[in-house]
Amino acid sequence: MEGEKKQIHFVLVHGACHGSWCWYKLQPLLEAAGHRVTAIDLSASGINPKRLDELRTFSDYTLPLLEVMESIPPEEKVVLVGHSLGGLNLALAMEKYPQKISVAVFVSAFMPDTVHRPSYVLEQYFERTPAKEWLDTQFEPFGRLEDHLTSMLFGSQFISFKLYQLCSPEDVALAKALLRPGSLFVEDLSKESPFSNKRFGSVKRASIICAKDEAITKEFQRWEIKNTGVAITKEIEDADHMAMISKPQKLYQCLLDIIAN
């Protein structure tokens, strides 16, 4: 069937402290258009049963995505969509399974390069973001002392004014109810080698800029694009950090435009 040939498999990867629930507006739009959607809960996220203190590495955290990628048949290619910290989860999947990805889409996301260690983009973000910008976000040590792990949980003010400022009060309340402590795993990522040009670098990349993002600013997103290089760049002028919730129809259209290229 002609319709079946055009079906795309989208794999949606959430950001820190979130879960697959954050795609609840975008997923039905894609499915109504006839596409297949897999929205993942990363380890210790959403309804994933693991606890954060059971994780030691960024790979531990990414395991559910890697398991999905492992299950993709050799003849199939998926569209990976990563939001915020999810961009680094995408990068790990791109390094391991480049042949299974048609395009990787970074939505207001951290985008590593092939020159620096994976932690570089996070280190640059911290360097350019004053501590006061985190508002009431809580950072706490967790796990074994020798692992130097730090948890992160977005506070009520940070959610309302930095992440969800253009979302409805109902969606802000939903986030406050469902967010779980997460981690950026900076220490672990700082020990890893850069992603390779041969594998990670071979995957077509697209970036969707959220122009009203108060968390990962438009300026930082543009610096990442210049630093990393992407094949396609789109911009949603009136989207906050949570474009899939504040502007799902526009994000949906951006994704359709990207897969049409």
Image (cartoon, rainbow, N blue to C red):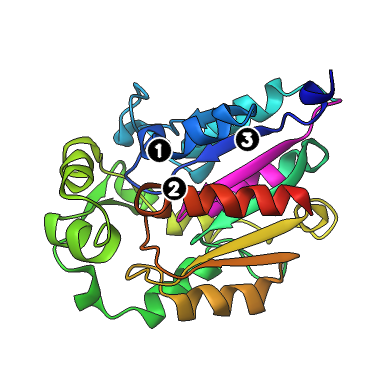
| Image vertical order of residue 18 relative to residue 125, above or below | above
Taking the view exactly as shown, the residue that stands out farthest to the top is 1
Secondary structure beneath dot 2 equals helix
Q: Earlier in the sequence, mark 1 or mark 2?
A: 1
Q: Earlier in the sequence, mark 1 or mark 3?
A: 3
Secondary structure beneath dot 1 equals loop
Residue 140 point in image, percent of width and height? 21, 53
Q: Quadrant of the N terminus?
A: top right
Residue at horizontal 49 percent and vertical 45 percent from the top: 58
Tell which of 54 and 11 is nearer to you: 11
Residue at horizontal 63 percent and vertical 35 percent from the top: 10
Residue 235 point in image, percent of width and height? 55, 68
Region in magenta:
75-94
Task: Identify the residue under disc 2.
Answer: 248
Q: Nearer the viewer, mark 3 or mark 2?
A: 2
In the rendered image, residue 139 lying in the magenta stretch gets the answer no
- Picture disc at residue 25: 1
Secondary structure beneath dot 3 equals strand
Residue 198 point in image, percent of width and height? 85, 55
Q: CA distance from mark 1 to mark 3?
A: 14 Å
Amino acid carrying mark 1 in the image: Lys
Residue at horizontal 23 percent and vertical 36 percent from the top: 178
Quarter residue 166 falls in: bottom left
Q: Quadrant of the C terminus?
A: bottom right
Instruction: Tell me: 202 left or right of 56.
Output: right
Task: Identify the residue under disc 3.
Answer: 10
